Every structure is written in structure tokens, then in C-alpha cells.
């Protein structure tokens, strides 16, 4: 299977590297700066097991040729419009596109551009970041990759995707209910991002502060009400596990949006929080805590 990995940041770099190491034909579509960095130093993985370096196949938008069987999109959500332009020449009649982005707005955007039949569901769970020299740093052993047809019908095309991905040295989950997995991932990351960005700290600091637990539970409840109104078929055991994970004061957690914020980077405010508020408005739901978070993030973006 010919695979195009759109992006070679922490997510794309890690999972793309594992696919390449498993013998898959993987090309990384990257910008000029990242292209030069990877050409010079290779793709470096720093994992709890040690350091590995590989020489990846690289392409830039101007040099992209031929159609790919699978395009995995791993860029930040605010870069999606440009990436759609970049990958367009690589999309053929049989191409499938698997976005691994935060939120859910990107699914409709990709479907409108390339067709509903080309977009499949995907998400990952990994604690990773880029180091100062562009190395991919996996901070914990967690490395899960979920994928499946958005309508739950995993046909022969999806079976081929599973055959390519399941032996890539990561924990793969071929799901027949990927939409619920996507809703639950959004519930987790948006709650985490909201409370960390608003309080400017990790969950341990928040939960051990006066009113911190009430803040986290209040944000969680607002988000759950929104996604349920939007079509999430609540799985009580799953949502309880998410709240339990977030509410453990012994485990300090932060979100990628918070880490970007404290470094002064652009953040996925509209995709992670803003879109929830738009959906809440559609159902006349009161979300005062999410509104406070959104104002906070908008002010941050104005001050950058």
C-alpha cells in the first residue's frame, strides 16, 4: 500500500516512522523547513526504549506525483485548508483519506472537498512532542491508532487499510464504531484543553486548587451535553473512565493545546472549543464555562 503521511510532527512523525519500519511504502509530505531538517538529521524517535533514526522518503507539495492508496493527515486543524490543496494531486479514484485531527469539523470539510466515500475515521492516543531539534519525543509507552469507516461498514477497502496498519509496531484498533470513539476523544481532549488553558496549569495543580474539581466536572458536563445533543450515543462506562482519568490528582496531565499556548504558538481554539460553542448554540444549550474558556483563548490569540 502506498501511504502519504501529510505532516511529520509528533503524531505524523511517530506513526509514519513505525509504518515505514514495518516495511510499508510511506512518504512524508512536509514544508521546506521540516524537509531540510529531516534531510540533514533523519527522522529521530526518542522513546522510553531508546533512540532510533531513520531516513524517510520525503516530498513537498511542488514535487508530489502519482496517486496514493491512503493519505493520513496529521497536521494542526488550522492548517487543513492548505493541506487539502497540497494533497489534491495525490488523490486518485481509489484513495482513502484518514484524518487524525482534533475535533470533528475537519471530517465535513474533507468530505466536501474530496467526497464522502473517500474519508474514513481515524484518531490516535499518544503522549508525544517535537524536541528543539525536530526529534519526535514519545513521553510514555502509549501509542494507539484507531481507524474505521465512518458509517461502521468496514468494507474491503478498509480491510486493506487494516492489513497495512495492524503490523506497524503500535497498538492498532480497527473499529466498527469509530464515530463514538471520535466523540469520546473530543470529550477528553476538549475538557483537558479547556481547564488547562483557563487555569494555566496541569490537572494535578487544578484538582488540588480550591474549586478546581468543580471546574473540571462542570466543563466536562457541558461538553458531554453538547456532543450528546449532536448525536453521540452515550456510553456511560466510557464517559465514566474519561472523567476518572481526568480527575486523578496523582497524575498531572496537560493537552497539546495548552503546551502550544504556553510556548506562544498558534492554537486550535476554534476547532477544539469554538466548534463546541457553535453546536451548543444550535441546540440552545447553556455553556457558561466553555464561553469563559473561549473568551480566554480569543484574548490570547489577539495578544500573540
Image (tube, rainbow, N blue to C red):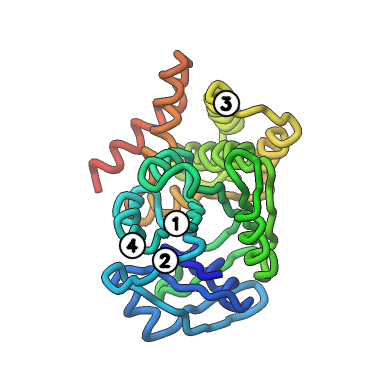
Of the two numbered discs 3 and 4 in the rendering, the one whose residue sits closer to the viewer: 4
For image coordinates 61% across by 50% down, the residue present is 252
Q: Which residue is mark 3?
A: 231
User: Quick check: 143 left or right of 116?
Assistant: right
Q: Earlier in the sequence, mark 1 or mark 3?
A: 1
Residue 89, label in figure:
4
Element carrying mark 4: helix
**Between marks 4 and 1 in the image, the one whose residue lies nearer the viewer:** 1
246 versus 19 height, above or below = above
Task: Say which element carries label 1.
Answer: strand
Q: CA distance from mark 2 to mark 4?
A: 7 Å
Mark-to-mark CA distance, 3 and 4: 34 Å
Seen from this angle, which residue lies furthest top?
Answer: 284
The N terminus is located in which quarter? Answer: bottom right
Q: Tell me if 109 is positioned left or right of 234 in this view.
A: left
- Categorize mark 3 by other alpha carbons within 10 Å: few (<14), some (14-19), many (20+): few
- Compare residues 187 and 198 and report the one nearer the observer: 187
Res 208 seen here: no
Q: Earlier in the sequence, mark 2 or mark 4?
A: 2
Residue 4 visible in the displayed image: yes
Q: Secondary structure at mark 2?
A: loop
Residue at coordinates 47% horizontally, 78% vertically from top-left?
Answer: 43
Q: Nearer the viewer, residue 210 or 87?
A: 87
Q: Secondary structure at mark 3?
A: loop
Few, some or many residues within 10 Å of mark 2 (<14, 14–19, 20+): some
* Residue annotated with mark 2: 67
Numbered label attached to residue 93: 1
Crowd tier of the residue under label 4, counting other residues whose Cα lies within 10 Å: few below 14, some 14–19, many 20 or above: some
Residue, x 37% and y 83% (percent of image)? 39
Quarter of the image holding residue 57?
bottom left
Amino acid at each position: 500500500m502506498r501511504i502519504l503521511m501529510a505532516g511529520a510532527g509528533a503524531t505524523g512523525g511517530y506513526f509514519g516512522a513505525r509504518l515505514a519500519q514495518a516495511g510499508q511504502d510511506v512518504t512524508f509530505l512536509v514544508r521546506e523547513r521540516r524537509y531540510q531538517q529531516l534531510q540533514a538529521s533523519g527522522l529521530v524517535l526518542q522513546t522510553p526504549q531508546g533512540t532510533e533514526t531513520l531516513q524517510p522518503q520525503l516530498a513537498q507539495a511542488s514535487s508530489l506525483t502519482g496517486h496514493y492508496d491512503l493519505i493520513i493527515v496529521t497536521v494542526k486543524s488550522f492548517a487543513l485548508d492548505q493541506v487539502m490543496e497540497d494533497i489534491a494531486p495525490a488523490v486518485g479514484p481509489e484513495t482513502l483519506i484518514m484524518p487524525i485531527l482534533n475535533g470533528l469539523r475537519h471530517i465535513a470539510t474533507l468530505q466536501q472537498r474530496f467526497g464522502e466515500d473517500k474519508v474514513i475515521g481515524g484518531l490516535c492516543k499518544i503522549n508525544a512532542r517535537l524536541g528543539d531539534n525536530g526529534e519526535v519525543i514519545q513521553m510514555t509507552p502509549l501509542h494507539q491508532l484507531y481507524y474505521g469507516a465512518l458509517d461502521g461498514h468496514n468494507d474491503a477497502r478498509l480491510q486493506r487499510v487494516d492489513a497495512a496498519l495492524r503490523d506497524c509496531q503500535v497498538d492498532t484498533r480497527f473499529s466498527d464504531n469509530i464515530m463514538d470513539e471520535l466523540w469520546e476523544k473530543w470529550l477528553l481532549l476538549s475538557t483537558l484543553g479547556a481547564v488547562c488553558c483557563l487555569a494555566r496549569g496541569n490537572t494535578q495543580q487544578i484538582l488540588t486548587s480550591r474549586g478546581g474539581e468543580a471546574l473540571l466536572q462542570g466543563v466536562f458536563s457541558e461538553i458531554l451535553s453538547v456532543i450528546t445533543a449532536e448525536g453521540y450515543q452515550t456510553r456511560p462506562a466510557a464517559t465514566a473512565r474519561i472523567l476518572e482519568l481526568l480527575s486523578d490528582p496523582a497524575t498531572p496531565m496537560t493537552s497539546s493545546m495548552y503546551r502550544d499556548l504556553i510556548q506562544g504558538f498558534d492554537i486550535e481554539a476554534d476547532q477544539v472549543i469554538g466548534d463546541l460553542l457553535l453546536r451548543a448554540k444550535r441546540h440552545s444549550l447553556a455553556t457558561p464555562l466553555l464561553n469563559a474558556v473561549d473568551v480566554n483563548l480569543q484574548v490570547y490569540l489577539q495578544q500573540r
